[in-house]
Image (cartoon, rainbow, N blue to C red):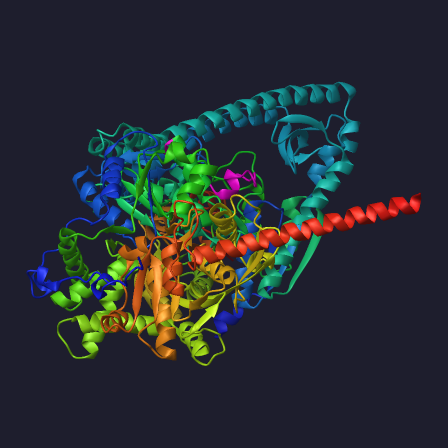
Amino acid sequence: MTRQPLEADQLRRACDSAQFGFDTTEELEDLSEVIGQERAVSAVRFGIGIQRDGYNLFALGPSGTGKRTTISQFLERRASEEPIPPDWCYVNNFEDNQKPNALRLPPGKGIELRKDMEQLIEELRTAIPALFESEDYQTRKQELQEEFQEKQEAALNDIQERAKKRDIALIRTPVGLAFAPVEEGEVVSPDEFQKLSEEKREAVKEDIAELQEDLQEAMRQARQWERKTRERMKELDREVAMLAVGHRIEELRETYADVERVVEYLEAVKDDVIDNVDDFRRGGSEDGESILGIPMERAREATFRRYKVNVIVDHSESEGAPVIYEEHPTYNNLIGRIEHIAQMGALVTDFNLIRPGALHDANGGYLLIDARELLLQPYAWEGLKRVLRAQEVRTESLSQALSLVSTVSLEPDPIPLSVKVVLIGERLLYYLLNQYDPDFSELFKVEADFSDEMPRTGDNDQLYARLIATIGRREELRPFDRDAVARVIERSSRIAGDNRKLSTHLLSIADLLEEADYWAGDEGRDIVTAEDVQKSINKKIERADRLRERTQEHIERGMILIDTTGEKTGQVNGLSIIALGDYAFGRPNRITARTRLGKGNVVDIEREVELGGPIHSKGVLILSGFLSARYASEYPLSLSASLVFEQSYAGVEGDSASLGELCVLLSALADIPIKQSLAVTGSVNQHGEVQPIGGVNEKIEGFFDACRAKGLTGTQGVLIPEVNVEHLMLRSHVIETANRGQFHVYPVATVDEAIELLTGVPAGERDEEGRFPEGSVNYLVEERLIELAQKHRDFADGMEEGSSEREEESSGTEE
Amino acid sequence: MDEQEEDLKIRRILVALDASRHSLAALRAAAELADSLEAEVFGVFVEDVNLLHAAGLPMARELRFPFARHAQMTPQRMKRQLRAQALQARRALSSICETRGIEWAFEVVRGRVSSSLLEEAAKADLLCIGRASRPVVQGPKTGSTARAAAVRAQRVVLVISQGTRIQAPVVVTYDGSPEADQALLLARRLTVETGGFLSILVPAEPSISPEELQDRLADNLEGKDIVVRYRELAGSGVMSIIRGVQMEGCGTLVVSRASLPQDEIGKLLDGVTCPVLLTG
């Protein structure tokens, strides 16, 4: 029995606005949770809740499905109830300043410690010079110096006196001291010395030798005294410094008594200040004074940098645990970096130049990263994995991490890490990482799979209305009336490509709402109506459909050969989809078939010229299977057929044309013309069953547009797989035309139903004797195939006889 | 420039150089004075004949710094060392004078240091000398050469220590004698140059009556745009001058040689740390 066309109401599942109990979305409450993502939400709840190693999340799904918004909402709600994590600071390690120490402080205390240390150093810079300039200190220092000088002088005076008594003087030479005999205050010249008696000369020599020994001893002694004096003066300096720094440090120790490492740090600061008290003693320098080109003041400030506190994580204004979204997840932006400053032509660094990364900021909370962005940044993914495995952040430059340089740099204390990382990305990335990175499944154990559609039920329609209200309020849009909401829901189904589903691609929906709001404003309306929603849909299509329009124009002008009336054998209207970005449209394609005697193969010309994809080729090969099984199970399929997508110059992929190809092949075999007023789409299996295809709406609309352009006759229509009826969400123009009986959509479940509709000739079923009714399509096909098989056999026999004769002739010749 | 100042005209400044830090202070002071007085600087380095003699003795050995090791002294080595010191002194002189654009000359003489310097000083208007050469013991004491120059040179002598310079306030002792007038004249000139006030120390028993002394001071300072402070000393000896200098926070002391007994000059030099200018 020939299939009847669908009723107009089957062509689109309209949304009844009467089901809504509101006038505009202004009356609706905001959604507190995301809709249609139960699986993902449950996974996110689990992932956030479980506090075990490796339970980081990967939120996967198409972009625009609200992954980031959903996760952010969840995290922010949960983080606000969690404790504020500690502050972290880097301070100088006075034992090894290449390895700065990390200090963990209660939230908000980092800034306090920094201020306290700044104040301490500021005070010491005033207090220490004051103490060293005090009379007490100067007197004690003078006392020590004089004591030393007195001792030294006494020793030398003693030697000088003893020398003098023997007429010998202690004289200063350019490089030392020497003794020489004197007469009337002047050194005896060598000539005069020679004039002295032998005895006298020897006596002088002995005296001088003795004095030299004494002098040597005195100088050795003086050096010891000097060293001791220096030590005593240093001790005095330490005492004075201690006086200045001791009680101040003690006060700070009390303030930070409950943070052991800070107390240790303060103790180290005290010792360092005492050891380097000279740095504090120097007062301000005159303008322009410099050392090796560095202004003195700047050089001095540089020495005090070691007492600074570099607060890298500050939670003084935080409420709850941090939720950080890192927009630009480079290696440095995640791990932190060590900056350098130029000094005297060299790049130098210290702990003050350690800068935190997103992992520091998110420590104790949550870090969201776009997976694609992360993977695009060199070494960022490896760096993140290393940190998650080690559970500590070790800030080092990339060149250090890769051992590219071996110059001295900093090795800061690693900071223990407790962070939940949430990667957001497309499904493909998730599956690729899962497949190719063995660490991935260990570190990201929770997958939150965001769906791009949800069931379209009455309840969900109501939730969808609230979603529209929520987005509208968030984006400050005009309220939507109930018809507008209904139209949005219908559009959502169309985006989902299924009249039983709603799209959860919130980005598309938000765009639609914003554009509808714009058009409502353009019309001067305070409320967005269905008309505005429709206009925004139309305008969006209009902006993108240059190519569709051009294609239709070519069909109308006969440049693309498409018949929408009449009948032709071996020619059928197929339908294809052209996708351009997020816009897709359908267009009819003429498919033709030619048959002749052959070896049973169906030639797919698209495949022969490499314009057909593998799925398309598969569809065509299935046709041979169908033909063999249905018609040629007991004799060879002696057919050679060629199939072609006429005027197709780009690639063809998909098997949605296989039903059309089979029908055109049957038409060619049976020599029965096909109605050109119909187009067909659907895939077919070896049993002749029609299977669903994608883009059914676009395809129907594509043929509709072609028919409308060439003139509607009332006989035109499209054959679609029965299963695809659920996907129908055709545009209103098609519905209206169908309603007037000017255009028809026929659901078909088998190839027989399709060929009947296309030819108007019954397909025919085998009777009890296994024969098709005479005149039916199947009968004619089978007859033709038997005929071809017979011809093939005759041809083969003829060939055989010819061959025997030739053999006989040749053996006769031989004889 | 009045008549008195013309008498005080200083055109040639001799600086005794021995490469010690005190002598470098003397060099700096000489250059500053030469700059302001538009004078020339002559540097003289005396190769001490005593050192050469000592080096020529058969038992000549020296204890060398800084390790107090004994080493043989020879005349050749001593000459080399002295030449090196002279070269160092010459470099210092040329550097400082050329920076300031002062005319300069340098001479090496051999002899006994004090007498050679006094001989050279006779050819100059002002002798600048470091407080001590390179003393065996570090201390405030004035060396024998500086002491001899201060006492015996018939010229203005500046005795200066390392770390000091001619600066305000200038302090001058004034007892009304004609020599004191010379000292006051020089002090007045230095006060103008250094830009501070002039402090005049008047001994408890000046050689003239207080009224006369006031009149002479008024005559000397009339029309000069300088701030003057007077301090009457408790006595007239060196110690009262030293105390007065300390109380005034003296920058530079100008004193007439004639106003002090010769054996007191050394005590004065030992008692103050600021530069001391001794006039005739």
Q: Residue at x 26, y 33 (%)?
A: A249
Above or below residue A310? Residue A471 is below
Residue A467 place in picture, x, y as percent: 17, 56
Residue B183 place in picture, x, y as percent: 45, 60
Residue A394 within the segment the image draws in magenta: yes
Q: Residue at x 16, y 67 (%)?
A: A484
- Image: magenta residue range: A391-408
Q: Which quarter of the figure is the N terminus of chain A placed in?
A: bottom left
Confirm whether residue A368 shows in the render. yes
Query: B187 or B45, which lies in front?
Result: B45
Residue A16 place in picture, x, y as percent: 13, 62
Question: Is A512 left or right of A665, judged from the image as shown?
Answer: left
Above or below residue A188? Residue A669 is below
Question: Is A174 left or right of A340, judged from the image as shown?
Answer: right
Query: A684 or A517, which lies in front?
Result: A684
Query: A260 or A228, which lies in front?
Result: A260
Residue A154 place in picture, x, y as percent: 49, 26
Q: How many marks?
A: 0
Residue B198 within the segment the image draws in magenta: no
Q: Quadrant of residue B72?
A: top right
Q: Quadrant of residue A555?
A: bottom left
Question: Is B80 left or right of A352, judged from the image as shown?
Answer: right
Q: Quadrant of residue A605?
A: bottom right
Q: Which quarter of the figure is the C terminus of chain A placed in?
A: top right
| Secondary structure mostly taken by the magenta-highlighted segment of the chain | loop
